[in-house]
Amino acid sequence: MAKPVYVLNGPNLNMLGKREPGIYGSTSLAEIEADCRNRAEGLGLTVEFRQSNHEGVLVDWIQEAGESASGVVLNPGAYGHTSIALHDAIRAVGPLPVIEVHLSNIHAREPFRHRSTIAPAATGMICGLGPIGYALALEALAART
């Protein structure tokens, strides 16, 4: 059986649908998960979908993905702007492809969000397209196999 794609979500993403819908939309994380599972099935992939508010847990999952996954879709949330630990974890599991996803356009927001600590270690980044960014990331990973 083929290895799954890990879809990992960082802090506060469990609050999607309630948290600042003007920025993040009204789609819940459970709805995004359902969409990911449907899109993955259409691409011949399976997903392991997870969320944590804790940086170390995300590091553990990235390291686990290095052994158990075919790729990672990572929405690091705010950790995308601050986490050297996530950056280093991604580099440690290379050449595993990792696609960074952000629902909002981080470059059109506050200046502290313009920089991603993840992007230099990731295979690619999708931002500003809302929940469809996850589906596009899955398509990108499927195209790499």
Image (cartoon, grey):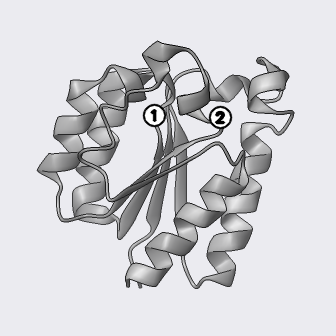
Element at badge 1? loop
Q: Amino acid at mark 2?
A: Ser
The answer to whether residue 46 shows anywhere in this view is no
- Residue nearer the viewer, 140 or 72: 140
Above or below 120: residue 78: above
- Residue at (54, 62) in percent of width and height: 137
Identify the image quadrant of residue 34: bottom right
Count the marks: how many?
2
User: Where is the C terminus found, in terms of image quarters?
Assistant: bottom left
Judged left or right of residue 75, residue 129 is right
Q: Nearer the viewer, mark 2 or mark 1?
A: 2
Which residue in the structure is indicated by mark 1? 76
Identify the image quadrant of residue 123: bottom left
Identify the image quadrant of residue 68: bottom left
User: Where is the N terminus found, in terms of image quarters?
Assistant: bottom left
Above or below 90: residue 142: below
- Residue nearer the viewer, 84 or 61: 84
Above or below 111: residue 141: below
Q: Earlier in the sequence, mark 2 or mark 1?
A: 1
Q: Amino acid at mark 1?
A: Pro
The answer to whether residue 110 shows anywhere in this view is yes
Residue 124's disc is none
